[in-house]
Amino acid sequence: MDWMLRSHAASYDSEEEQRVKARMLSRTDRLQGSEKILLFVTAQEALEFCENALLHQLSTSRTKPQQAHIAGPLEQSLPSVLAQILDATNEEKRILERLEGERYHTEIELETGKRLFEKETHPDSFFVVLKGAIANTTGTPRTIYRQKKPILSGAGLVRRSEYGSRSNLFDENFQRLSESSDDNVVASLWSVGGVFGYVDFLSERPRHYRAITTQDGTRVAQFSHSNMNLLEQEDLELHALIQKVLLHASVTDLMNCTCDDV
C-alpha cells in the first residue's frame, strides 16, 4: 500500500514527505493541508501529528511570551500519564502524585532494540510508557512471508525492502534491526501513555507477544506483583485509581491477543 501510493503520485516520496511534514509543523500562518496524502505507520502517530500542528498554530498565535510554549507528548511523568488516561479530577491528580519517588514502581531506561520481555515468558510485571515507544512484535510466519513476498502491480514487480514511512516512533537503529530480522515484524505500537502487558499479568498466563523498544532512551514504569501488593496494603485510594487505569488498558491489551486466545 505504501509503495503503490507513492509510485502513483498519490503521496510524496519519503524525503519530500518529511519536508512537507516539517513545514506543516513550523507554519506561522493559517494551518493548511498538503496537496497529497501523508503516510503514517500508525493511527496514533497520525493523530499526534495533527494535534502537534494545531497546538503549534495555537502557540504561535499567542501575543504573550508566557503563553507561547506548549509542551508536547514526548516525555511525561507517571502521575501525568495516568491522570490523562483517567481524565482525572483535581482530587484524583493529588492522589496520583503519591507515585512520585518510585516506592510502588520502578522506572527503567532502554536502548533501541532492547527486548523488554519475550513471548511465552512468565508475566511478572506490566508497564507504562513514559518516553519513546514500545513495539509488539508478534510477527507470525505468515505475516513475515507476506512482507517478504514480491508485489506484482501495474508498474512492475516490487520487493519490500524497508519502511516507506519514516515514522518518528522508529529511530534509524530500530529500522535497521527490523530489516535484518524476521523477529521484528511490528504488529502494534505503544507510544507515551501506553499501558501494556496487563492482561497476561492479571491472568498469570505466558506472554502472548514480544515487547521491544523502537527508540534510544525509551523509558517505562514497571509494576510487579510485589509493587501492587505493597500499594494495596499501604494506599487503598491510590490502588483503586490504578485499577481504574488498568480497566481502560486491558481493552487495548486484549487486541494484541490472537482470535484463538480471546
Image: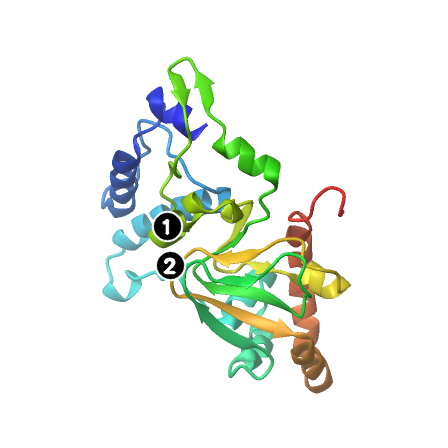
Which amino acid type is marked by label 2? Answer: Gly
Question: What percent of the width, then of the height, locates residue 247?
Answer: 70, 60
Secondary structure of residue under mark 2: loop
Residue 15 visible somewhere in the drawing: yes
In this rendered view, identify the residue nearer to me: 127 or 87.
127
Residue sitting at 57 percent across and 37 percent down? 143
Does 132 sit left or right of 211 as displayed?
left
Secondary structure of residue under mark 1: helix
Residue farthest along the top direction in this orientation: 154
Residue 168 visible somewhere in the drawing: no
Q: Which mark is residue 178?
A: none
* Total numbered labels placed on residues in the image: 2
Question: What percent of the width, then of the height, locates residue 35?
Answer: 31, 27
Question: What percent of the width, then of the height, locates residue 31?
Answer: 30, 40
Write down the quadrant of residue 29 in the picture: top left
Query: On screen, 195 above or below 167?
Result: below
Write down the quadrant of residue 84 in the picture: bottom right
Q: Which mark is residue 52?
A: 1
Cβ atoms at labels 2 and 1 below 8 Å apart:
yes
In this rendered view, identify the residue nearer to me: 32 or 49.
49
